[in-house]
Image: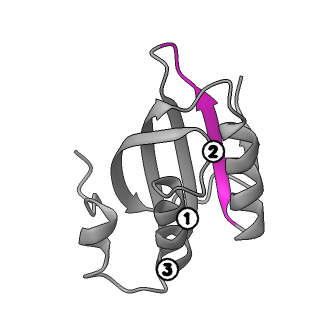
Amino acid sequence: MSPHYIGTMADAADHDAGQDVRLRARVEGVVQAVGFRYWTVRKAEELSLTGTVRNEDDGTVAVVVEGPQSVVLEFRRWLGSDDAPGRVDHVEESVSPATGEFSSFDVVY
């Protein structure tokens, strides 16, 4: 675990809300072949976040997103909401300081 690891989005609430963070999320449920990646890109762009989304071989979707903590929290809430396409059963997450490696939000194939 990185010494800069923060934990989950709930743990991040104890840190500076304006700090840029990186959320890594593994989304489980019916999230492939339902437009989930497309809508994830749209939501991230709407919130001016950067990162990636991709389908995994095990049927999950992997998301890496960076931006201001409060905005990333809004995105995280959306990931687990009924507004997200398909059916999200569980979101496994970890949060760390942002690296700044992304300049946009893209689907990775």
Q: Which residue is mark 3?
A: 70
Question: From this viewpoint, is residue 104 visible?
Answer: no
Q: Earlier in the sequence, mark 3 or mark 1?
A: 3
Where residue 35 sits in the image (x, y, percent)? 72, 36
Q: Which residue is mark 1?
A: 75
Where residue 71 sits in the image (x, y, percent)? 56, 75
Using the image as rendered, state which of residue 22 and residue 75 is in the foreground: 75
Write the residue at 51% across / 54% down. 79
Question: From this viewpoint, is residue 90 visible?
Answer: yes
Compared across the picture, whether 88 is left or right of 75 comes to left
Where residue 41 sits in the image (x, y, percent)? 73, 49
Q: Which residue is mark 2?
A: 85
Compared across the picture, whether 26 is left or right of 2 comes to right
Q: Residues within 10 Å of mark 2 (few under 14, many from 20)?
A: many
Amino acid type of disc 1? Phe
- Magenta range is 49-57
The quarter in which the N terminus is drawn is top left
Q: Is residue 20 above or below residue 37?
A: below
Q: Residue furthest top?
A: 57
Write the residue at 34% across / 66% down. 9
Amino acid type of disc 2? Pro
Q: Which secondary structure, mark 3?
A: helix
Q: Earlier in the sequence, mark 3 or mark 2?
A: 3
Write the residue at 46% across / 42% down. 88
Q: Is residue 105 above or below residue 98?
A: above
Q: CA distance from mark 3 to mark 2?
A: 22 Å
Q: CA distance from mark 2 to mark 1?
A: 14 Å
Amino acid type of disc 3? Ser
Tags 2 and 1 touching, CB below 8 Å: no
